[in-house]
Amino acid sequence: MDTNSCRMFTFSVAQAFDKVTDDNKRVLALGETARTDFLHWAWQIKFEAAKNAAHVVDKMLHACGGSAYKRDMEMERYLRDAKAGWVMGPTNEVLRQFVGKAVLLGFESLDYWNQSYNNRAVENEIKKLDSDGKRELAAQLLEQADKDAASEPAKA
């Protein structure tokens, strides 16, 4: 995707955001998420824009040669800023995982705040253990549960 495509993509999704919120005039009720249906498109915009910026700056760097790293040309700042787009949260690698997981398993499968465990992954890891390993893991989990219960405030 080139620069103008990224711009048009951004404009189109922003227009969709405005449409579902009555040009951002509608007051959303508690728990209402009018723009959620477009979240994966916003992620894709971030991914494509960061990728495009890095590509453009890389071309500029090739055109200017080694002198592009001199501070007086300000190219080094553009290079640094363009590369930062890849790693600023959520990183492009994380976005790829989010989009893939949302497509394959649905949006409800995403755990942004790391508050639920991945049952499928846990079961997969447990399958690798023999009976003694499972008993050892169970003992560790019970010990940890006892520690957690002791540190929790008493329920009335």
Image: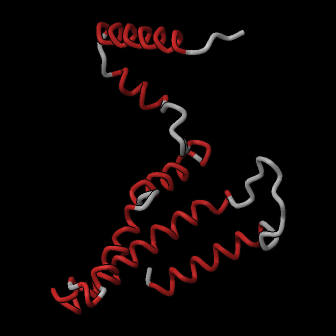
Considering the image in quadrants, where does the N terminus appear? bottom left
150 or 5: which is nearer to us? Answer: 150
**Residue at left offset 55%, top offset 45%:** 110
x and y percentages locating residue 143 in the rendered image: 41, 8
> Which color scheme does this rendered protein use?
secondary structure
Relative height, residue 25 to residue 55 (above, below): above
**Residue at left offset 31%, top offset 22%:** 128
**Residue at left offset 38%, top offset 7%:** 139
122 vs 55, left or right, is: right
Residue 37 falls in image quadrant: bottom right
40 or 120: which is nearer to us? Answer: 40
101 vs 30, left or right, is: left
Residue projecting furthest to the left: 66
104 or 93: which is nearer to us? Answer: 93
Relative height, residue 91 to residue 115 (above, below): below
Relative height, residue 33 to residue 136 (above, below): below
Residue projecting furthest to the front: 72
121 or 149: which is nearer to us? Answer: 149
The total of numbered circles placed on residues is: 0
x and y percentages locating residue 41 in the rendered image: 58, 66
Relative height, residue 28 to residue 41 (above, below): above
**Residue at left offset 30%, top offset 86%:** 74
x and y percentages locating residue 35 in the rendered image: 70, 61
Considering the image in quadrants, where does the C terminus appear? top right
82 vs 153, left or right, is: left
121 vs 149, left or right, is: left
